[in-house]
């Protein structure tokens, strides 16, 4: 992705990370444009979580540099990075500790110095965005895993970082919650926020994320439009990822209809194609 520096939210420049002298990330380089929703995909052990930890400063690269909004992260403390980059961990219990959901959502902005009078509005907005208003005065620890995950996401939204990372956000979510989360990602993008989503959920990524980066054994294997990557069945198999069922269907159907779109990954597009075809055929008959 080639963009001018002022439009780049995150840049990894030849980033390496070793654990016990074993390379986990090997020369990782990419740029993420401001306001873009990006998926990071790869098999277990490919380096996805390590990449996120390097980004938020929990660990530092063995070699190379990470540029966050034009600033070399090596010059920033973890606290300074946290003001720009928020993260929702795969296990929501890692970041929940308050007595009520409302207190949980207020803790972050209060801790970074947001004026007290502005906090209730932030909390209510995040509660509504994640559809958890009814749990405002409940203990987060009495909620289901999916609900706790939404609370964890809301607690990051109240801090209003420019870059938000999600580690497996669709895990444990039903179809309605996934749809709401997709709508949230679009809203964040329209607000100029950059989101980075680590996920194994090929269906969710295919429907919701326009750009995808694929990691395999600590190296970048693909970096491009989601529809091009998820329809590359050879690449997906090589990297230990499944292909969306809609892609498998499209691949099969294309044998009988050469006009069927080659990069179709969304169910809506398939339905629109068949509806258009049916209408065209009916018109021909008339």
Image (tube, rainbow, N blue to C red):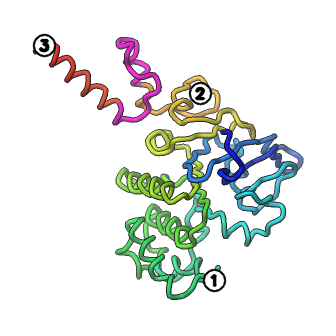
Q: Quadrant of the C terminus?
A: top left
Q: Nearer the viewer, mark 3 or mark 2?
A: 3
The mark found on residue 140 in the picture is none
Judge whether residue 279 is colored magenta. no
Of marks 1 and 2, which one's residue comes earlier in the chain?
Answer: 1
Residue stretch rendered in magenta on the structure? 249-269
Secondary structure found at label 2: helix
Residue pointed to by mark 3? 285
Q: Nearer the viewer, mark 1 or mark 2?
A: 1
Q: Is residue 100 above or below residue 56?
A: below
Residue pointed to by mark 1? 113
Q: Residue at x 41, y 54 (%)?
A: 183
Q: Residue at x 60, y 35 (%)?
A: 224
Q: Residues within 10 Å of mark 2 (few under 14, many from 20)?
A: few
Judge from the rendering whether residue 220 lies leftward or rightward of residue 174; answer left or right: right
Q: What secondary structure characterizes most of the magenta part?
A: loop
Q: Real-space Cα distance between discs 1 and 2?
A: 47 Å
Residue pointed to by mark 2? 237
Of marks 3 and 1, which one's residue comes earlier in the chain?
Answer: 1
Residue 16 at x, y percent in the picture: 83, 46
Secondary structure found at label 1: loop
């Amino acid at each position: 992705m080639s963009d001018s520096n002022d439009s780049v939210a995150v840049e990894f420049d030849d980033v390496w990370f070793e654990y016990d002298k074993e390379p986990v990330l090997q020369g990782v380089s990419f740029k993420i444009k401001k306001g873009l929703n990006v998926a990071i995909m790869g098999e277990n052990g490919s380096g996805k979580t390590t990449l996120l930890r390097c980004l938020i400063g929990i660990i530092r690269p063995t070699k190379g540099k990470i540029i966050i909004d034009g600033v070399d992260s090596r010059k920033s403390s973890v606290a300074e990075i946290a003001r720009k980059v928020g993260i929702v961990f795969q296990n929501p219990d890692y970041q929940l500790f308050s007595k009520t959901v409302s207190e949980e959502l207020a803790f972050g902005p209060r801790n970074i110095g947001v004026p007290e009078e502005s906090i209730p509005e932030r909390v209510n907005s995040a509660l509504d965005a994640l559809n958890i208003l009814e749990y405002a005065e409940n203990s987060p620890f009495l909620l289901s895993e999916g609900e706790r995950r939404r609370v964890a996401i809301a607690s990051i939204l109240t801090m209003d970082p420019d870059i938000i990372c999600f580690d497996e956000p669709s895990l444990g979510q039903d179809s309605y919650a996934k749809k709401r989360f997709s709508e949230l990602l679009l809203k964040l993008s329209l607000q100029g926020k950059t989101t980075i989503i680590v996920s194994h959920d090929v269906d969710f990524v295919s429907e919701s994320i326009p750009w995808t980066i694929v990691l395999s054994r600590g190296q970048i294997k693909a970096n491009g439009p989601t529809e091009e990557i998820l329809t590359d069945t050879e690449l997906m198999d090589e990297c230990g990822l499944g292909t969306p069922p809609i892609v498998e269907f499209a691949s099969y159907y294309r044998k009988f209809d050469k006009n069927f779109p080659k990069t179709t990954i969304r169910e809506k597009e398939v339905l629109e194609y068949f509806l258009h075809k049916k209408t065209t055929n009916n018109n021909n008959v008339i």
